[in-house]
Image (cartoon, rainbow, N blue to C red):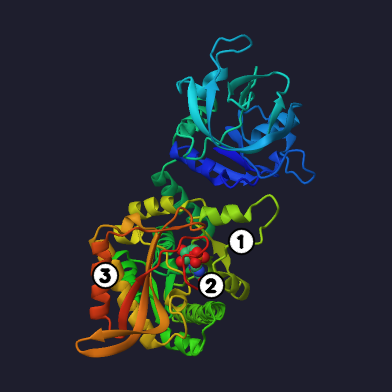
Amino acid sequence: TILILDFGSQYSHLITRRCREHNVYAELMPCTQKLKDLNWKPKGIILSGSPYSVYDDDAPHVDPEVFNLGVPILGICYGLQEMAWQLKGEVTKCDHREYGFAKIQVSKIGTEGQNSSVDALFQGLGDEMEVWMSHGDQLSAIPPDFHVIGRTKTAPFAALAHNTKPFYGIQFHPEVTHSPRGKEVIGRFILNICSCKTNWTMQEFIGKEIQRIKDICGPRGRVIGAVSGGVDSTVAAKLMHEAIGDRFHAIMVDNGVLRLNEATQVNTMLNKDLGVNLTVVDASSLFLSRLEGVEDPEQKRKIIGNTFINVFEEEAAKLEAEAEEEEKSGAASKGKIEWLLQGTLYPDVIESISFKGPSATIKTHHNVGGLLKDMKLKLIEPLRELFKDEVRALGRLLSIPAPLVQRHPFPGPGLAIRILGVVTREQVKILQQADNIYIEEIRNAGLYDQISQAFAVLLPVKAVGVMGDKRTYEQVIALRAVQSEDFMTADWFVFPSDVLRRISSRITNEVAGVNRVTYDISSKPPGTVEWL
Ligand code: XMP
């Protein structure tokens, strides 16, 4: 395992990714991690970048013990500067912040003062590499016992190596795709210098995770979890089922603002096809009655979150009561429900392990925070080490159907935040139909996987139209489709016009109450993905 110490760079998780792409397991921890508290020894350590300067008063610093551990270290950007700062080099502000592409000249092997291991980091990568820089500080003097292994026009100390120890520092960011050979540089470090084994595979992960779940749940412990029809909760549920069978019980709450036929489809897929123990609760009337007359999106979110908790708790209580009855009647006894399954992914975990302490924006799913508080359940998070596309790969290995594995994300508050204005059963029906046509046509055109998220929005305005000889006065559907890496920024998707034409014509013909369709051409920022 490679230990990556995070100094708060926006790219830290990408370093983890690149290691795993080499089939080497890497773990990201806050830079404040004390080595004595670590119960495993890393094969190598990578120090990440950071928005700080090493000489800032509040700058994060690494446990100096890392330099005595006897394992290879690679400092990236701030990580290089931190290494230099700790080992008595000099860091100063650049005249100009350097941001963008640079060409790094790799120093030749055999120059005075170098030994052959030195260039292991760049071995076979050529004399010159295009790399991505993003820094405001750089080294003005290298620490004693180090030598230069690469330079750029503006940074004479762009890459360093220690004369005798396997310590390396690079000013550029090898983890971003803008450094085309960056992944190879990381590979040189973890494979050649750290000699890591390439044995981290998803299949291996499944085996280990199933064993871990079995161990923590014990022979009788039971787990419940909510499923939504999305990728994460489905994959998590299937994994739980593989581990503890029917002692895992999934609950799907139909809140009345799901996509067309969603509850039925999830039931068929999870229960019938995948064999997961599932109860679908139709609570749509309760949700819709509580949403009556509400227009404010935050209010909608709150109502849906709280109602979800009420319904879920009630359902869990029923399951518990059933188990007690069974026990009384002498049937096979089940343990208590002790655990709550949550589909937390790695990016959420990273956000909450920031070195500044728990960050203000920990993304606990709105439905689950309250559940933990009230139900005194312990949390089980089988996906917490994985990135989204790894969850998809895991899903494929667990035989979850491909269309589900590739499914676009869908917000917890569902169609309620895509119906601008008040939510009624009629409005939900209109939007469900329009959205279904939209997605169907996107799939038919073979475009679904090129789009990160696509959905229809129902606008609370009426527009004039003409149908037959009559004037109509009906509602408007807005179509949204975006491409995005992480949903922090997004671009609108460019559709072939014939696809848009077909979608528009089908929606206005087939969905009663809609006479106009528009396409949203706003990027994020300044827009957001959702309309509410
Ligand atoms: P925005 O609209 O913030 O959306 O650009 C970014 C991503 O977040 C999803 N989203 C939500 N997901 N509950 C959720 O579970 C919510 O309240 C919520 N609001 C937005 C949105 O669908 C997009 O993928």
Image position, residue 377 (x, y; %): 58, 69
Label 3 element class: helix
Mark 2 highlights which residue? 367
Callout 3 crowding tier (Cα within 10 Å): few <14, some 14–19, many ≥20:
many
Q: Which residue is mark 1?
A: 362
- Label 3 to label 1: alpha-carbon separation: 38 Å
Which is nearer the N-term, disc 1 or disc 2?
1
Q: Earlier in the sequence, mark 3 or mark 2?
A: 2
| Amino acid type indicated by mark 2 | Asn
Nearer mark to the viewer, of 3 and 2: 3
Residue at 27 percent across and 72 percent down: it is: 504
Instruction: Point out the frontmost of discs 1 and 2.
Output: 1
Determine if residue 406 is in view: yes
**Which mark, residue 503?**
3
Query: Picture coordinates of residue 32 (x, y %)?
Result: 71, 44
Residue farthest along the left direction in this orientation = 468
User: Mark 1, residues whose alpha carbon is within 10 Å: few (<14), some, or many (≥20)?
Assistant: some
